[in-house]
Image (cartoon, rainbow, N blue to C red):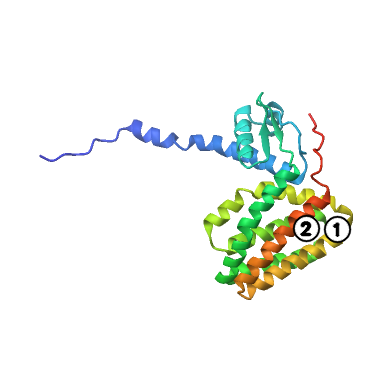
Amino acid sequence: MLAFPPARNSMDHDMIAVRPAPLVKTTVSASAAKYLRSEIIGGGIRAGDSLPEARIGELLGVSRVPVREALVILEREGLVTFDRRGTARVRTFTLEDVRELGVMRLVLEPMAARLAANRGDATALGEIARNLTNLKRARTLSDITGLDFEYHRLIMAAAGNSRLSASWENLASQLRVVMRLFHQAWERKTLAVRINTVKAHAALFDAISRGDGAGAESIAREQAEGWLVELGESGAFDSPVEARE
């Protein structure tokens, strides 16, 4: 006796048709998170500022639910904190926070530099070279900060290790905030910041492009250690920033 599969009725088809609907909600949350992330990283919303869901929802034209979900996303990224009452605020980075980020850079970036040098991917090296060219032409601290961050991301990608890159990306939003605050501390020395950044990046790129894995790893480690020292000397993280309600 032949067994036939049960016939699919119109209800099954209708159910399949509506399944993508929840994605709209997710997209709204992701869009809200993208907006808030950009504002926090760029300094439009400052450390310690409160993030009222109703006000943000009104600004973005959405309900409080996707805003709440967006804030949870940013909490996971380390940009937002919630107090006991559930009030969200932009995270204030302390010197200890920065030191912890520096330790993670020491763990991840030297290994990425070695792998990138050993791998020698021509396309990846070309992207890093273009980044250096753009950095040499940069005139504002905002441009320098953006290119500085992009440079490190490109090296992580050039390593060709998805898990290593994923570990670094988990810290990316926090690193961008810290880099901005660090560069802003030297705002009157924009030219010096650019010259020093170009010099450091060029030295590391030279080792990577020559395929010197050990040398690239050593330079990346030295630079990450130096970054920690400079962050402490900058005074950018000595005291909390006054919050705005």
Q: Residue furthest bottom?
A: 210
Please tell me whether mark 1 sits on a helix, a strand or a loop. helix
Residue 245, position as x, y percentages in the image: 78, 29
Residue occupying the point 61% across, 53% down: 168
Please tell me which residue lies in front, 44 or 214: 214
Residue 163, position as x, y percentages in the image: 53, 55
Q: Is residue 92 left or right of residue 107?
A: right
Q: Are marks 2 and 1 in contact (CB under 8 Å)?
A: yes
Q: Quadrant of residue 92?
A: top right
Q: Is residue 216 above or below residue 91?
A: below
Q: How many marks?
A: 2
Residue 218, position as x, y percentages in the image: 66, 67
Residue occupying the point 13% across, 41% down: 2
Q: Is residue 53 left or right of residue 235?
A: left
Residue occupying the point 83% across, 51% down: 234
**Marking on residue 144:** 2
Q: Amino acid at mark 2?
A: Ile
**Marking on residue 102:** none
Q: Amino acid at mark 1?
A: Thr
Mark 2 or mark 1: name the one nearer the start of the chain: 2
Q: Quadrant of the N terminus?
A: top left
Residue that label 1 marks: 190
Please tell me which residue lies in front, 185 or 54: 185
Q: Report whether residue 121 is seen.
A: no
